[in-house]
Amino acid sequence: MSGKSRRDFLKKSALVGAGITGLSTSTAIAGPKNILSEDRMGVLVDTTVCIGCRQCEWACKYAHDLPAGDIESYKNREVFDKMRRPDHTALTVVNEYAPGKNSNLPVNVKVQCMHCDHPACVSACIVGAFSKHENGAVTWDTDMCIGCRYCMAACPFQVPAFEYDKALNPKIMKCDFCFELTKQGKLPACVSICPVEALTYGSRTELVKIARDRIKKNPDRYDDHIFGEYEVGGTSWMYLANKDFAELDFPNLGKNPAPGVSEAIQHGIFAYFVPPVSLYALLGGIMWISKRRKELNEEEKQ
């Protein structure tokens, strides 16, 4: 271990210790960024247009340096024989369902992080690794993540995935709204590659108007529901479909933001104990020290 690495470790350990010592009077770990901008962006997914080509899956993997394989292999529709969920190897997946109203074609549904307006993962993370950005993206800092997986338990859509196959430094993985691309004014990888424009990227406010206009002009084509407009307080990703969303495995979540519900339960449980934020700071500090010590020991062996 280098002298600098050890000094940095000891400094941060001391800071954690100081935070633990002062649990009753202050919070040891700063709060995350959580911005709900009127100008936030979003994506409207029109499942009546999607053809299930899965090119979005390939583009997502390619953009995030995940093993993507040959794009031609994504034409194999045998994957639709079972329902799939995003995981650490595929941050978005497409599933196929029986046809909806006035159609003989199957319904294909792209699944990924919904980038909630009031993200439960941001609220639940005990070390502030998750952030909600001005452009609507919900991202996380892998260097801060301690692998507690509270985000997985908190997410109403069960999206964050864990690298269970990695013994050392497993990470949480999920769609990051192609944050590095979109902050440069570029389209998310999945949107840019879609050959039928089933995915529309733009201002969330404008996307809601577009969705309502499509429903109004084509009532026989669409179910009168924009999923994500109000669910759990609203999401950056929204959907149109020609059948009830429950038939497409979308959860019935109500309009209340998920963090509000989880925090109310938290505060009720811990009302007569250590304040939740302080307790989380304590646990997070201990877990960070343990994780960092393991990393430094590995460096010494090299």
Image (cartoon, rainbow, N blue to C red):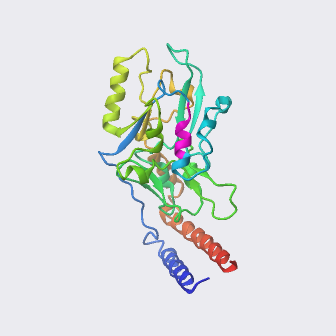
Q: Relative to residue 104, is residue 239 drawn left or right?
A: left
Residue 217 position within the rendered picture, expressed as x and y whole percent measured from the top left = 34, 18
Image position of 79 with respect to 101: above or below: below
Is 221 within the magenta? no
Residue 244 position within the rendered picture, expressed as x and y whole percent measured from the top left = 51, 23
- The answer to whether one can see residue 50 in this image is yes
Tally of marks: 0
Q: Residue at the location (50% across, 63% down)?
A: 127
Residue 198 position within the rendered picture, expressed as x and y whole percent measured from the top left = 45, 30
168 or 158, nearer to the observer: 168
Magenta-drawn segment: 53-60
Q: Quadrant of residue 192?
A: top left
Is 56 within the magenta? yes
Residue lying furthest bottom in this view? Answer: 3
User: Principal SS element in the magenta part?
Assistant: helix
Image position of 261 with respect to 111: above or below: below
Q: Quadrant of residue 55?
A: top right
242 or 186, nearer to the observer: 186
Q: Relative to residue 123, is residue 248 drawn left or right?
A: right
Q: Residue at the location (64% across, 37% down)?
A: 73
Residue 150 position within the rendered picture, expressed as x and y whole percent measured from the top left = 57, 54
Q: Residue at the location (60% across, 60% down)?
A: 147
